Amino acid sequence: MAVARRGFLMSVAAVPLAPGALGAQSDASPPGDENAVAGALAEAVKRQFGTHLDAAELAAVKKELAKGLERAERLRMGARLTNADEPVTRFEARPPQKRGGGR
Amino acid sequence: MIGEEVLFSSISEIGAHLRAQRVSAVDLAQWSLRRLETIGPKLGAVVTVTRDRALAEAHRANQKLLAGRDRGPLHGIPYGAKDLLATKGVPTTWGAEPLRSQVFDVDATVVQRLAEAGAVLVAKLAMVELAGGLGYNNPDASFTGPGRTPWNPEHWSGGSSSGSAAAVAAGLVPFAIGSETSGSILTPAAFCGVTGLRPTYGLVSRHGAMALCWTLDKLGVLAHRADDCGIVLSAIAGPDPHDPTTGETFRYRERPAKTGRPGQRFKVGVLRDATAETDPDVESHFRQALAALRDVADLELDVPFPDLPYREALGVIVDAEGAAAFRDLIESGKVKQLRDASDRVGGYAMMMTRAVDYVDAIRSRVAMRAELDALASRYDALVAPARTRLAPPIGRDFDALAPGSPPAPDAPRSPATIAAGNLAGLPAIALPMGFGKDRLPTSLQLMGRAFSEDTLLALAVAYQEMTDWHRQRPPGV
């Protein structure tokens, strides 16, 4: 189950942040941008998968896309990653022992 | 005289009856099969009853036991498997209508290991379609219908291991295997009033299990007691060449663990704001649970939980990996056959997840893992309610249950333990801690450092020795 756009966690466990709450004091995307990007992505969905989706479903997809973009923005503002932060490509639960050197 | 109520007993108690020949493995299998066939459908808990396989395995278990070839504590014990575990020749539906006729020709590693331990597979248990990966919004999200908690069938069993939890709670099986990507063991354990163990990521092989998120998926145990979970985990854990994430081993009670007695008291961190946003019953029961824990543990109150965007990172990862995992179903349009309306469209939005967002999410996991390990390393367990709310009613969308207005930005929020624990791959146990409004269960969560299952289980066993919530039986079953 994912967050923000997933109803169960929204209602039962995770009361979502107010939209843009974490990013409210940043100088990142102005409000409303997510909607424009979501519209563009929804158009891509329509072109790729339009035969499977009616108008109401496409509207629901667009709504989900906007929520997903807002969520990604909150992640970006909350995680504060730098150029040196590497991804885990094979995840292990036990943190690796510190080695000498490093960046 | 022993009857089918023995299925509510612990694995050790059932094993003692078997070895004293007061019951046979065939008796146990037949009682379990009868209850699965009569009670199971009322709870939406069962997909397939594996009657022929069960009786054949039970007969073999009997013969071996009589011949003195005892496979250990699971010998002759019936169990159910969430229907995302491959079982040779038996449908494995992943809870999804378009996959109702899917059959594999191998057993999942977990199923193989349980067979080697002498356990008897009696059923494939119901689950939320595709383990909830496409964003379901209603309890009725499986082709078998909504999962119902045996404590009050008008309420949801939780998901996605719905049938695994309900079947244990209703005494259809003494234990069941479930899976968790983000809450799918702890949530149904909480809503069904059973004990649920989510092992450390990489401790149990997922070979033969449906993939939702390769970097998050874990298989675990639902049972009446923490002790049962430890016994089952011993049988299923360990390296498997078919799952490259595995490597560690686990042997329950192999190493001496604390007992809670003087000189061996546990150290427990009670998370700050653990009861923010909780149902009043959950808050009250949590305080009672803490009072019980004080008999065996030194509690440090108000422990701050690292404030990081766990839910956001988890959501991005589930969307990206889930879209890849189910790409064929999405692109073919077969998702339109799914039960839940949100599941029918969710995959199309997931397909548009941006690569940079996914990479940032898996980059953020490194810092999250480090911060959580630093916190967890100071305690034997961190505690909070497993779920902040009681099981929601059947028939209502989840988003219709959400509070009317969003909380103020500075309002206390309960720590996102499920999202955080899953992102960091940490083990956790959900334990029944009471019954609230409408006889709905509440649940205590113990979360620990990676591969600290022995300590978490020892604390859970100590808690259950002081309480009897796990021994209670739902009415009418």
Image (cartoon, coloured by chain):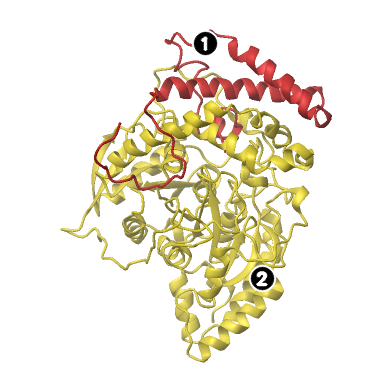
Chain colours: A red, B yellow
Q: Quadrant of residue B42?
A: bottom right
Question: Which quadrant would residue B206 be assigned to in this image?
Answer: bottom right
Describe residue B98's horizontal placement relative to residue B352 as left or right: right
**Amino acid type, callout 1:** Ser
Quadrant in which the N terminus of chain B is drawn:
bottom right
Point out residue B193 in the picture as x, y percentages from the top left corner: 50, 52
Amino acid type of disc 2?
Leu
> Mark number for residue B33?
2
- Residue positioned most to the bottom: B67
Q: Secondary structure at mark 1?
A: loop
Front of the two marks 2 and 1: 1
Query: Badge 1 sits on which subunit?
Result: A
> Residue drawn at (70%, 43%), measured in percent from left and top?
B140
Give how far across and how far down residue B69 sits, in percent: 48, 87
Pick whichever, B178 or B35, lies toward us: B178
Residue B401 or residue A46, whichever sits in front: A46
Viewer-closest of B168 and A91: A91
Above or below for B102 versus B78 = above
The answer to whether B199 appears left or right of B156 in the picture is left
Q: Residue at point 65% right, 27% down?
A: B352
Which residue is identified by label 1? A29
At horizontal 41% and vertical 27% (from top left) the residue drawn is B413
Tell me residue B256's x, y (percent): 26, 65
Mark 1, Cα crowd under 10 Å, few <14 / some 14-19 / many 20+, is few
Q: Looking at the rendered structure, which numbered label has been put on residue B270?
A: none
Tell me if residue B274 can be seen.
no
